[in-house]
Image: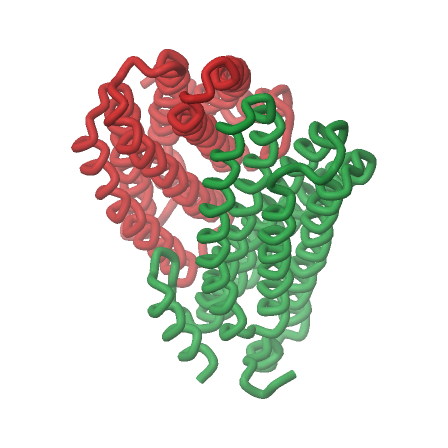
Chain colours: A red, B green
Amino acid sequence: MENTHVNFEDNYSTHISQQFNDELEQIRTQLLTMGGIVERQVNDAVEALLTGDADLAEKSRRTDQQTNDMELLIDEQCTTIIARRQPAASDLRLITAISKAVSDLERIGDEASRICRHAIDLADDGNGQRGYQEVRHIGNLVREMVKDVLTAFARSDTELAYRVAKQDKAVDQEYRTAMRSLITYMMEDPRAISSSLNVIWVLRSLERIGDHACNMAEHLVYLVSGQDVRHASLKEMKEAAQQGEG
Amino acid sequence: MENTHVNFEDNYSTHISQQFNDELEQIRTQLLTMGGIVERQVNDAVEALLTGDADLAEKSRRTDQQTNDMELLIDEQCTTIIARRQPAASDLRLITAISKAVSDLERIGDEASRICRHAIDLADDGNGQRGYQEVRHIGNLVREMVKDVLTAFARSDTELAYRVAKQDKAVDQEYRTAMRSLITYMMEDPRAISSSLNVIWVLRSLERIGDHACNMAEHLVYLVSGQDVRHASLKEMKEAAQQGEG
């Protein structure tokens, strides 16, 4: 790990109670575990769609219950720690940021489920659908965002979090282009309206996954720097991210 | 106010510190103030769309900054109270529930903004568009949900919160019917694809507003009953809501 990264252990070391350290470490680990599951959900959803694999889509949808349960579990642990440990400053920020990140992860899982539903609808139409190239491309971009933001959480890497937020702008741009092209296609071939709409919903879900990854990046910058960068410009976020690393 | 309602003041009265009571009362008031602004945003967005009033849509979009600012302010106050007062049990639940409700309110404001953007796009096409009847109907349903869930928060009325969650099922049903009818229409008249898609996005935003109002209802049931009813069935929510009022 590069030494520009602020590690959570730096915070932990100031605690007298080893048990408190363990509790904080535990919720962080659970966030990352949940993140790993959600990351796979997104990957499977996109793969199921592109390969027309309805079984994979079904299987992936079933893991949604697991992420829902994890959300409740982690949230409950956050509340318990606040009530028992009465954390302040950076510990409280860690708990707040994790609680918010978990909520975004759960919503990413929801969007992955929606993609699976459309994958099942589209599976009968065979692969090679119009718009699939765009799904693959935008899918790759947001999968990278989800992976990166989890790595950023694992390493308290605000620089990487900033790059995730920046990537979100690129995704929005690609999304708008893909939408325009699909609308043109629907006008040219009205028989394709129904299946094209399925692809449009998938693109919309991918774009939303990007938004949630971006939210998570903002929560991490808040955790490390103490600055709330929601609704801030990219430039303001960059400054906060650099401060956090200083 | 009916006597089945548990009032926040009942909790407050157990605090020795009057100032702590005031702080909790203040964030509750701010949630309701923000709720009032967001409620008007949703009303204006739907009205602007249905009447083709691009000016109203522009004006309404500009209030989004205000709700963003309020989200950050209330969240900061929640964190400060946790750090200074070290609340436990029902006080901590109040803060947690408000913090989550504020996040849903902000997202409702975002969806209202999206509706305004489509209202501006559609204003040139004149009113009386295909699908507008459905927008009016579903719009009325979700406006009622937002109003009711805020009243539920004001009165700690879990029974009303349950009715909001129940209403969400009706909205989902109406949404699916409206979507099917619009897709049929697009197939019949491909020239209407572009404007119909705008209406489809509006319906989607309304359906999401319903989801967020439903989330808020769940947060209130958690606040009052201590039971986390996210991802629970309507029946489980009803039981928790009744317990909360017992």
The residue lying toward the viewer, choosing from A79 and A138, is: A138
Q: Quadrant of residue A169?
A: top right
Residue B164, visible in the rendered structure: yes
Residue B92 vertical placement versus A170 (above, below): below
User: In the orientation shown, which residue stands out farthest toward the bottom?
Assistant: B3
Q: Is residue B70 left or right of residue B246?
A: right
Residue positioned 34% across, 46% down in the render: A24
Residue positioned 72% across, 43% down in the render: B50
Q: Is residue B22 left or right of residue A203?
A: right
Q: Quadrant of the N terminus of chain A?
A: top left
User: In the orientation shown, which residue stands out farthest toward the front?
Assistant: B188
Residue B139 vertical placement versus B185 (above, below): below
Residue A78 vertical placement versus A143 (above, below): below
The residue lying toward the viewer, choosing from B52 and B81, is: B52
Q: Position of residue B91 (x, y in %)?
A: 52, 68
Q: Position of residue A207 (x, y in %)?
A: 47, 26
Q: Is residue B33 left or right of residue A229?
A: right
